[in-house]
Amino acid sequence: MKKLEFLILSLIILLALVLRLYKIDRPLADWHSWRQADTAAVSRNFIKEGFNPFIPKFDDMSSQTNGLDNPNRYRFVEFPVYNILIYLVWSFTGVSVTVARLTTVAITLVTTVFIYLVVRRFSAWQTAAIASFLFATIPYNIFYSSTILPGPFMVMCLFMLYYFFIRFIENDKSWFFLSLSIIFANLAILSWPIATFFCLPVVYLALDKYRLGTIKNIKIWLFAILSIMPFIAWRAWMLQFPQGIPNFQFLLNEDNIRFKGAFFRWLIAERLGKLILSACGFALFIIGLVIKPAKEKLFYISLLISCLVYFVVFASGNVRHDYYQVPIIPTLAIFMAIGTRMLFEIKTPVFNKYLGPLVAIFLILFTFAFGFYEIQGFYWINKPQIVKAGQAVDRLLPKDATVIAPYNGDVAFLYQTNRRGYPITDRPLEEFIASGTKYLVSVDMGDAGIQNLAANCKVIEKTSEYLIIEMFKECIGK
């Protein structure tokens, strides 16, 4: 890497860090806090209850994830690779939401470097720099790379996989780069299994190098088998804990939304054309897409096909959850970079060569402006009461108490209490009491049922924002 390249990449990394410090100390009650709380709770319980990555536990004891009671609080989704990383950091710093967010920020900075390194293997350094810059500065990505979610970690591992596999392809006698490829393939797939969709670029690299000989290449088979076997083993292991496995079928094609008008509207108009890229960024993406592909661009096309297949398979998941688009951001940034560079280097007499760069700068600036406008609300804490109520519970109730913290099933409120329990009243209160759960905390001060409990049960603390109650059988139903 030349000195100029190193300097520019360093400035991009510094800018990426500064941008992500915006509201980095916000409590875990921002956008998609329910999913962040699930993730953070697993790491916190490793600290509180002992480290056992093969039996991850969160705080939710309810039946809402799959209809089965979960008194042991099992949380079997992805293997807790990211949770383990947060646990290791917290082992030194203490449990801190801000520290966890900063860990995700650090992960994203590494990703930014590897996006540069990967794109640099196929394109000029200018394209690599623009791609890294856009990845680092798209407002949607700024927010999600300061959340407590496994997605950014998976993206980092994918681009480390791509880079080391490229190095292996360039020198296929190197067991070192093959081993690193296997390690990061495992980390990517285990941390979020949708990474399997994004292994298509690896298949392209192998086919481009060996052609039909790929089928007979022992090292490629070794890579494939060793990359998928730990995931298969994990899936087999977790079947022993059905109460801890959330339903996921609804993420595939709920209401048969795939290929319907709503599917295209949500993914293209609402997500790509509004939330993530805005109309301006989407224009740059389209320009980069329609430029006549050189041979090296086929790698980028394989990335794009991975995104499309992922969209199609997890149709309703991508429509329902905007964080499901985190894995596609590098691909969008790469094609936007190609489009941007084309506008800067227009040489045809049909276009004004001086206007091209101005148009590119205009589109990028408005991508940032419109993008921040769309995601600024993601940082807001719409219910600060849950934070105050959670702190009160942590201060007043026994450490081993189980609590009911109803918040429409959102575990963010329960997480604030630092207790296990229920984020939803999924059974009669008498059953909660019979099973040993007698504390209820609520921020819904206007609810008639809550007011009735306060009038007849023991009130531990009451403010204008929250209410903590100790319940008994005698006070229920009065």
Image (spheres, helix red, strand yellow):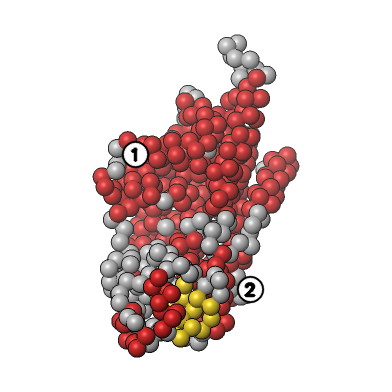
**Viewer-nearest of discs 2 and 1:** 1
Question: Pointers 2 and 1 in contact (CB under 8 A)?
Answer: no
Q: Residues within 10 Å of mark 2 (few under 14, many from 20)?
A: few
Instruction: Find the residue positioned furthest to the top.
Output: 349
Q: Is residue 425 visible?
A: yes
Instruction: Find the residue positioned furthest to the left.
Output: 256
Looking at the rendered image, the quarter that the N terminus falls into is top right
For label 2, the SS is helix
**Image coords of residue 173 (percent x, y):** 48, 50
Per the image, the residue denoted by label 2 is 93
Residue drawn at the location 51% of the way across and 49% of the way down? 159
Residue drawn at the location 57% of the way across and 55% of the way down? 380
**Image coords of residue 447 (percent x, y):** 42, 68
**Image coords of residue 368 (percent x, y):** 61, 39
Please determine whether, in this image, residue 129 is positioned above or below residue 180: above
Camera-side residue of 404 and 322: 404
Q: Amino acid at mark 2?
A: Thr
Mark closest to the chain's N terminus, 2 or 1: 2
Please determine whether, in this image, residue 31 is positioned above or below residue 136: below
Residue 333 appears left or right of 447: right
Q: Amino acid at mark 1?
A: Ala
**Image coords of residue 408 (percent x, y):** 40, 64
Location of residue 336 by image quarter = top right
Residue drawn at the location 73% of the way across and 44% of the way down? 7
Q: CA distance from mark 2 to mark 1?
A: 45 Å
Per the image, the residue denoted by label 1 is 262
Q: Is residue 80 visible?
A: no
| Residue 422, label in figure | none
